[in-house]
Amino acid sequence: MNASFVIDDGAPGPSPLHCPIHLRSLDGSGKTLDWRGFGPYDIYVSQPGRYEVTVEPLPGFDAVAPIPVDLTRGELRKLSIPLHRGG
């Protein structure tokens, strides 16, 4: 999966040295294997299926609600995660 943040005011977003995005399998034993990048993030999972995407609390931004995604084998799923200033 390729995940990136979209900031509501167009300003630069967070660029942490770790990946603040986490995936949890909703229908099996899939897990995150690895990630690369500093935004957008390429996140690799052990098997296709339905996952829940969560984002760690980011200073200066409102909390992000969990996002369900379906990942299929051989397809690069792109996900834009909206961030709103606040928090």
Image (cartoon, rainbow, N blue to C red):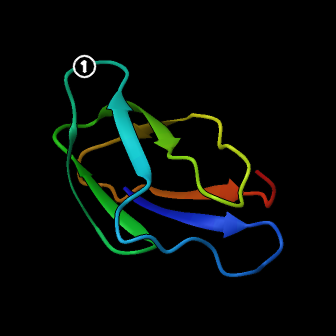
Tell me which residue sits at (71%, 56%) in the image: 61
Q: Residue furthest top?
A: 27
In the picture shown, does residue 63 fall above or below 19?
above
Count of marks, rendered view: 1
Q: Position of residue 65 (x, y in %)?
A: 65, 36
Q: 30 or 48: which is nearer to us?
A: 30
Q: 58 or 13: which is nearer to us?
A: 58
The amino acid type found where label 1 is placed reads Gly
Q: Position of residue 77 (x, y in %)?
A: 42, 55
Q: Quadrant of the N terminus?
A: bottom left
Q: Is residue 49 left or right of residue 52?
A: left
Q: Position of residue 40 (x, y in %)?
A: 45, 72
Disc 1 residue crowd, few under 14, some 14–19, many 20+, Cα 10 Å: few
Q: Is residue 68 left or right of residue 82?
A: left
Tell me which residue sits at (43%, 51%) in the image: 21
In the picture shown, does residue 39 fall above or below 61?
below
Q: Is residue 60 left or right of residue 28?
A: right
Q: Position of residue 62 (x, y in %)?
A: 74, 49
Tell me which residue sits at (79%, 61%) in the image: 85
For the residue labelled by badge 1, is the local secondary structure a helix, a strand or a loop? loop
In the picture shown, does residue 54 fall above or below 18?
above
Q: Image quarter for residue 22?
A: top left
- Residue behind mark 1: 28
